[in-house]
Image (cartoon, rainbow, N blue to C red):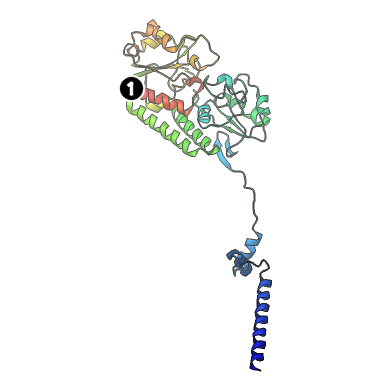
Amino acid sequence: MRRFNFFKLATFIAIFAIMSTACTKSSNETGQPQTNDQIKDTQGTGDKANDTKEINEPTNTPAEPLTVEITDVHGTVVVPVNPKNVVALDNRTFETLSDWGIKLAAVPKGVMPADSPYINDDSVLDIGNHREPNLEILAAANPDLVIIGQRFATFYDDIKKLVPNAAVIDLNFDVSEAAASPGENLVNGLKSSTIALGKIFDKNEEAEQLVAAFDKSIEDAKAAYNGSDTVMSVIVSGGNIGFSAPGSGRVWGPMYEIFGWVPALKVDGSSSDHQGDDVSVEAIAQSNPDWIFVLDRDAAVSSTTDAVPAQDVIDNSPALQNTTAVSEGNLVYAPNDTYTNESIQTYIELFENITNSLAK
């Protein structure tokens, strides 16, 4: 009798164990142990607001395109960061953009340094020079961004109309005879333009390095000048020597203000003419400058052939041979591409040349 009761009890226990196992499986349909995430999903956070946020939070939302505000001579312009289709018309920007590996859709190849990689790239359209530009090519390029400055500044309104959907920035700054502070304009203009390009093309560190090198080159050139030597600046073009006047003269003019140079000669009605003002070589010689700074215009123009190098023109000018500058070898030549490449890199190189020459 006792054995029978024990058998019945054992049977009931086994049935109860089977039923418990079945209940457990029904609560976990996969038959697998629950992970921490599954437990969290089942239990919730205990905070209804957070639980709702997690459920309703969107996924894979496309990021808004990045833009940056650039202040140019016309005001504030919203520009896309890392634009895909860029047209550059400002000679002061070409070397910087090239060094940063920026792809361009169109450029004015006729007024660019002959060694610019953009010239020999057939995928880069040629808009032509600033005297007769083919702006229809610019429109056909369908740019996201157009960079204007220097020679093309007068076409700002025309370009805005041609490409209404593009961001158009004008990085021009005034160093003409009308400028009250050409030296300050040159320094601040090159620095602000470089910083703006850094923001647009996500090259902020590179832009800051260029500006720092530019500032240092200015400081060094100032320190190297003794404050009393007289300076004559000239432009050699077509075998002729033109006068680059203090203040307004092409390339050299603003430097008189920047470095405090004492001019060997002043002329009323001077200009920023690209070939220099028409002043006789005899008048230049009579001023007897301690230093002569030379810009070789022909060396920078790719269309110029059989040009006489500026150094040969100076060396073969009888009137200049007895000046202090020539007799003592106090001559500084701007980099050959300066006339068509007035980038911040060009000025850094030029200022370093001036420093080394003055300090000898």
Look at the image and tell me in which quarter the C terminus lies: top left
- Disc 1 crowd rating (10 Å Cα; few below 14, some 14-19, many 20+) is some
Query: Residue 204: horizontal and vertical position, in percent?
Result: 49, 39
Query: Residue 8: horizontal and vertical position, in percent?
Result: 67, 88
Mark yes or no: residue 217 visible.
yes
Q: Residue furthest top?
A: 318
Look at the image and tell me in which quarter the N terminus lies: bottom right
Q: Is residue 101 left or right of residue 14?
A: left
Q: Report the number of numbered marks.
A: 1
Q: SS class of the residue under badge 1?
A: helix
Q: In front: 352, or 291?
A: 352
As drawn, 67 above or below 176: below
The residue labelled by disc 1 is: 358
As drawn, 7 above or below 22: below
Q: Residue furthest bottom?
A: 1
Instruction: Report which quarter residue 294 is drawn in.
Output: top left
As drawn, 122 above or below 238: below
Q: In front: 107, or 290?
A: 107
Instruction: Report which quarter residue 20 is drawn in.
Output: bottom right
Query: Residue 270: horizontal and vertical position, in percent?
Result: 47, 17
| Dot 1 amino acid type | Leu
Q: Is residue 210 left or right of residue 222?
A: right
Mark yes or no: residue 255 visible.
no
